[in-house]
Amino acid sequence: MRRKNVMNGSVPIARVAPAIWLLIVALSLPFRAAGDPPGEIAERIDALRAQIAHHDELYFKKAAPEISDYAYDQLKRELAVLERDHPELAAGRGDAAIGDDRSGRFATYPHRQRMLSLAKSYTETELRAFAARVSRQLSRKDVAYVVEPKFDGLAISVTYQNGRLTRAVTRGNGDEGDDVTANVMTIRGLPRQLRSTSPEGGSNPIPDLIELRGEIYVGYAEFNRINREREASGATLFANPRNLAAGTLQQVDPAVTAARRLEIVFYGHGACEPALTCPGSQLDLLRRLRAWGLPTVGNPRRVTDADGMWQAVREVGQERGHYAFPTDGAVVKVDDAAAQRELGETRNAPLWAMAFKFAPDEVETRLRAIDWQVGRTGVLTPVAELDPVQLGGSTVSRASLHNAREVVRRDVRLGDYVMVEKAGEIVPAITGIDLKRRSPASTRYVLPTTCPECGTALRPLADGTASLLCANQDCPAQVRRRLAHFVSADAMNISGLGAASIDKLVKAGLVRTPADLFHLRRSGLLQSGVASETTADHVLKEIEHSKRAELWRVIYGLGIPRVGATTAHVLALRLNSLEDLARWEGRQRGFGTAVPAADLAPDAVAALDEYLRSPSHRAQVLALAELGIGRTESGRATAGPRKLAGKVFVLTGALPHFTRSEATEKIEQAGGRVATAVSRQTDYVVFGDGSGSKLDAARKIGVAEIDEAGLLRLLAGE
Ligand code: IVH
């Protein structure tokens, strides 16, 4: 067990209180363990602990979970009940409820006040039992509660001392967590300094010290953006926004964190001094957080009894489909701070709050077939074809099976009954197989050996991901997908043409390469059925207009593996044209002096090497160049005085006014270059709040240190 009980001294409430909430949680549980012989129970407890530890490891350390959060919660719940009924088996096994998100990659830092989790409920009965217990304990019926959405991200504690942000620490084991201050500082909208007067007027005293508790998350729009970009560059996708948030927060280089839009919301507090300045209720806390200038819960509902509470929880459940952030439940909190204190807490959770977790939209259906889709780069993706079922308000007949390795590892077979889950806006995925319903006659699924589109023999992908690859670049599926990517909104943004139009144009033999699009005529559009008499001119105009797209869009649109939008931006900033792109000088030199290979990620270098070594690819790039595409000024280093020409910068810590990408853009526009590590080639280290080892490294070799103001002076030519 990796959870250690590191708290010194006594934990008196912990001995009694868990029994209370476990009793409540257990009210509606089937007592599967009641009649089981003790040996079997001990085995089951061991198995559950091992499984939970395994999933914790995947979740916290590798950010790559295998099971849904709901399935994970069910494991923890079963363990909690068994341990409650068999304390002799639980004794000395440490504290299983709170988890441990320490990654081992950061220094740890202690919380002043233990950072708690929440007790969870799954049914109306459990939630009403919570209200009944609260009323009993407070000896009154009319208890006011606040109901909030439960944000699905990572718990964080941010300390403000005299109004100034001093530290950000993950929950860890509750007593100490990872010190992720530098990463948290990159979050936009998180003020370093609290405002003392509220916008509505009136004072809003700032405590000398307050540990604010909240959640770091990634919104759906950003999640989709990053996954689209990863898909385009052939990287593995994040399973859900929470993995993405976890993976981002755990980055040791804050520059990576800054390139992704993390968000933060506050909903609670830990230590707060002096008491006089601390909020008198949950609603008061939320109001003050807003007045201090902090992001907080948008639409808290205050209710005055159990019926109102249940109604509010159901409303959150109905609304959550429209939230821009991921939620997996609602949180109910006793409003009044004095009542909260009276109710107290266990070692793991306050006794005045309760989470209600919504069951994911999950259904069981039958797997009919596996359809292998050939992507733009030739990688085959398995898609499950299912008996259509209703799920989360729509009919689902296809679901993701991720990749060939997953199909083999999970031993999924045709005819199996599978669980399909849909979370938020995310594509439905298969989360389990109902082995009890498997036909005894079923046989292992045999992976395809030839491309379903062109019949070429498949080979495993060289990157060790055990994906299957169709290496025929003329495979019609690849041709169609590459073109669909080229015209897509993120690339050339030719709005008159979608994937279906591209299919028709390719089938009609009118288009094979991107340049062919620009030779299309009215007659071709009409004959292929892509446009009508009335729409043809519009489509042609759109195509013509796209010739002025910025260079990065064209480079990105080429669909070079591993060259996502970010790398395309980097290239476009320093290359002048597509002709420059065709002048690739190989793995060692990159684009000569304009973009040395060392400035690019190694996998992008390898991919560019492979792509541009092919004469047909170079011909395609040059054919676009001849049409005058990629020549606009925008999106690349502008002319004018290039004050920082040749200078190399390293950014560290968070700057007061600029995000890292904004600072990078400014430096590059002025002709400078931003490197990620300090070396003797570095001219300046630009430091901000929370800068660490890079500044130390700079001091050791005597590199000039400047702050944001210094950078602005350089940019202004002073
Ligand atoms: S209150 C003492 N409110 O859910 C206060 N937690 O599964 C404890 N969470 O650890 C937390 N949204 O990370 C609270 N509106 C909300 C929340 C929330 C998400 C998280 C938090 C907590 C976890 C429990």
Image (cartoon, grey):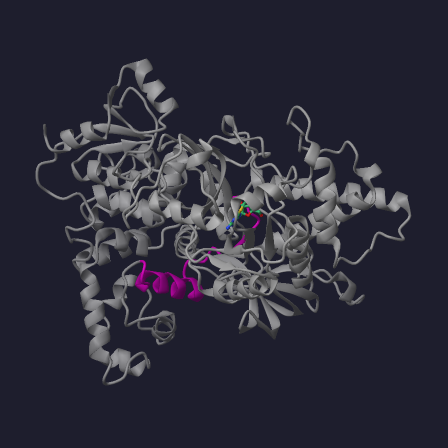
583 or 356: nearer the eye?
356
Residue 470 painted magenta: yes
Q: In which quarter of the image is the C terminus?
A: top left
- Residue at x-position 69% and y-position 36%: 14
**Picture quadrant of residue 616:** bottom left
Q: Where is residue 210 in the image (x, y as percent from the top left)?
A: 44, 34
353 or 513: nearer the eye?
353
- Residue at x-position 28% and y-position 80%: 531
Q: Which span of residues is magenta-colored?
A: 463-490
Q: Relative to 624, is 509 above or below?
A: below
Q: Position of residue 303 (x, y in %)?
A: 52, 60
Residue 624 painted magenta: no
Q: Where is residue 416 in the image (x, y as percent from the top left)?
A: 70, 66
Looking at the image, residue 457 sits to the left or right of residue 506; the answer is: right
Can residue 240 be spotted in the picture?
A: yes
**Picture quadrant of residue 361:** bottom right
Q: Position of residue 82 (x, y in %)?
A: 79, 46
Looking at the image, residue 679 sits to the left or right of residue 321; the answer is: left
Q: Quadrant of the N terminus?
A: top right
Q: Relative to 29, is 260 above or below?
A: above
84 or 556: nearer the eye?
84
- Residue at x-position 28% and y-position 50%: 200
Q: Relative to 436, is 699 above or below?
A: above
